[in-house]
Image (cartoon, rainbow, N blue to C red):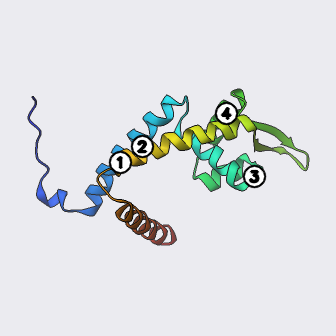
Amino acid sequence: MAHVEETPERLAGKPSWLLTQLAVHAHRLASEGFAEAGARGYHYRVLAALDEFGLMSQAEIGRRCNMDRSDVVAAVSELEREGFVDRAQDPRDRRRNTVTLTEQGRTQLRRLDRALDQAQDHLLGPLDEQDRRTLTRLLGVLLTHHQRA
């Protein structure tokens, strides 16, 4: 068995270090879950946004999902090939494409929701429900504060 190096205490006691290490682990878990469903994180973002907000332009998807334009175009193209979204030229502005979620897309979104829920359960396994809610609330407070700054 390989020897595991201990993390220096001055790092291990820093929230920034802990959040970074946990974020890497969380990303891996989510990515693996999405891959098992034949998807990527960008697919989930796009499908979730369309489900919640309805028809949107690709530019609006990028803004709402914090995605680069080229990543939106690639994700929408992949989702369209699978029949999960419909893309059409906006009749009011021919330079703009609008995107809508299909029934197949809703089904895929539910699959991805289950995959992400399993990843969350694995990540947060040591915490009881109250601690999970508290952690989520506190992370939300921090993120909101720093997004405004």
Q: Earlier in the sequence, mark 4 or mark 2?
A: 4
Q: Secondary structure at mark 2?
A: helix
Give the CA separation, mark 3 to mark 4. Answer: 16 Å
Q: Earlier in the sequence, mark 4 or mark 1?
A: 4
- Residue at 63%, 55% (x, y): give it: 64
Q: Is residue 134 above or below residue 122?
A: below
Q: State the image coordinates of residue 3 (x, y, percent, origin top left).
A: 8, 35
Identified by mark 1, the residue type is Leu
- Name the disc covering residue 54, or none: 3
Q: Secondary structure at mark 4?
A: helix
Residue tagged 4:
79
Residue tagged 2:
119
Give the CA separation, mark 4 to mark 2. Answer: 22 Å
Q: Are marks 3 and 2 in contact (CB under 8 Å)?
A: no
- Residue at 82%, 44% (x, y): give it: 95
Q: Are marks 2 and 1 in contact (CB under 8 Å)?
A: yes
- Quick one: label 3, few (<14), some, or many (20+) residues within 10 Å? few
Q: Are marks 4 and 2 in contact (CB under 8 Å)?
A: no
